[in-house]
Image (spheres, coloured by chain):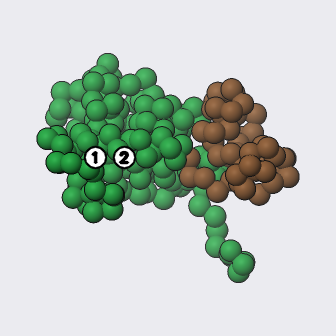
Chain colours: A brown, B green
């Protein structure tokens, strides 16, 4: 998460998060219910992702 | 976002897609998936030509419809206009989508499904086009009537596209 933020200025949104981590979307929603990309960004201490997908 | 928003947040959306062009289906897909990413609930209801989006032998071949509108916003291709201009523009848009990390429709439906979004097909239109559950992709949860769509949309903002 922090790596992506450093490189692109924003955290990974859903599709990128799933692809980069290798964790299926379904599991991400189980791990971080109600908005995985948003929650993961919060835990990583970076702003909420600006991507739309 | 500087000003404090005192309105009640939206908790659930019910997106209806009635079109089958590329530009007709993507807004609905982005709205549904975007809602899930925000931690909201989302249902997707496919009706009329929107059923093509979940029809197995059609979903991967959706094309751009308003070619003129897209062409006016893109750099002109070198040489003569390709013969099948719709296919050409569709290809370009799909490339553009991929570079923006916007997935193809099948993967998009999977993301919505796996994110907890329920995807429904319209019974009246499925009957009219002689389509059954077997014709639809696995992400389709059920074929339902308009009444059941309203039931599934309880508490939701309904958005028709």
Q: Residue B2 got which mark? A: none
Instruction: Residue at 16%, 34% (x, y): give it.
Output: B128
The answer to whether residue B34 is visible is yes
Horizontal side, residue A47 vs residue B95: left or right: right
Residue B112 vs B16, above or below: the answer is above
Residue B65 vs B116, above or below: the answer is below
- Rendered-image quadrant of the N terminus of chain A: top right
The answer to whether residue B146 is visible is no
Label 2 marks a residue whose chain is B
Label 2 crowding class (10 Å Cα cut-off): few <14, some 14-19, many 20+?
some
Q: Secondary structure at mark 1?
A: helix
Name of the residue lying farthest toward the top: B134
Estimate the spatial distance between the alpha carbons at disc 1 and disc 2, rounded to whole Å: 6 Å
Horizontal side, residue B50 vs residue B43: left or right: left
Q: Secondary structure at mark 2?
A: helix
Instruction: Residue at 64%, 68% (x, y): give it.
Output: B8
Where residue B67 appears, as percent x and y from the top left, is: 23, 53
Label 1 crowding class (10 Å Cα cut-off): few <14, some 14-19, many 20+?
many
Where residue B156 appears, as percent x and y from the top left, is: 51, 55
Residue B110 vs B45, above or below: the answer is above
Both marks 1 and 2 on one chain = yes
Towards the viewer: B2 or B122: B2
Q: Which residue is mark 2?
A: B93
Where residue B112 appears, as percent x and y from the top left, is: 52, 38
Where residue B13 appears, as percent x and y from the top left, is: 51, 53
Name of the residue lying farthest toward the front: B79
Q: How many marks?
A: 2
- Marks 1,2: beta carbons within 8 A: yes
Q: Which residue is mark 1?
A: B89
Towards the viewer: B55 or B150: B55
Label 1 marks a residue whose chain is B
């Amino acid at each position: 998460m922090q790596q992506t933020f450093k490189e692109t200025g924003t955290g990974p949104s859903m599709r990128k998060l799933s692809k980069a981590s290798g964790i299926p979307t379904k599991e991400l929603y189980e791990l971080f219910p109600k908005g995985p990309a948003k929650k993961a960004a919060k835990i990583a201490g970076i702003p909420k992702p600006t991507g739309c997908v | 976002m500087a000003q404090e928003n005192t309105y009640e947040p939206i908790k659930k959306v019910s997106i209806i897609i009635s079109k089958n062009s590329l530009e007709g289906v993507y807004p609905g897909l982005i709205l549904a998936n975007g809602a899930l990413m925000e931690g909201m609930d989302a249902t997707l209801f496919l009706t009329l030509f929107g059923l093509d989006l979940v029809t197995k032998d059609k979903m991967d071949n959706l094309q751009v419809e308003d070619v003129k509108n897209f062409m006016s916003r893109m750099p002109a291709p070198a040489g003569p206009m390709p013969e099948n201009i719709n296919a050409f523009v569709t290809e370009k848009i799909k490339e553009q989508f991929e570079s923006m990390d916007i997935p193809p429709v099948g993967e998009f439906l999977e993301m919505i499904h796996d994110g907890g979004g329920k995807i429904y097909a319209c019974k009246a239109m499925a009957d009219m086009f002689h389509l059954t559950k077997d014709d639809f992709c696995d992400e389709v949860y059920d074929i339902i009537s308009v009444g059941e769509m309203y039931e599934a949309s309880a508490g939701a903002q309904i958005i028709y596209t």
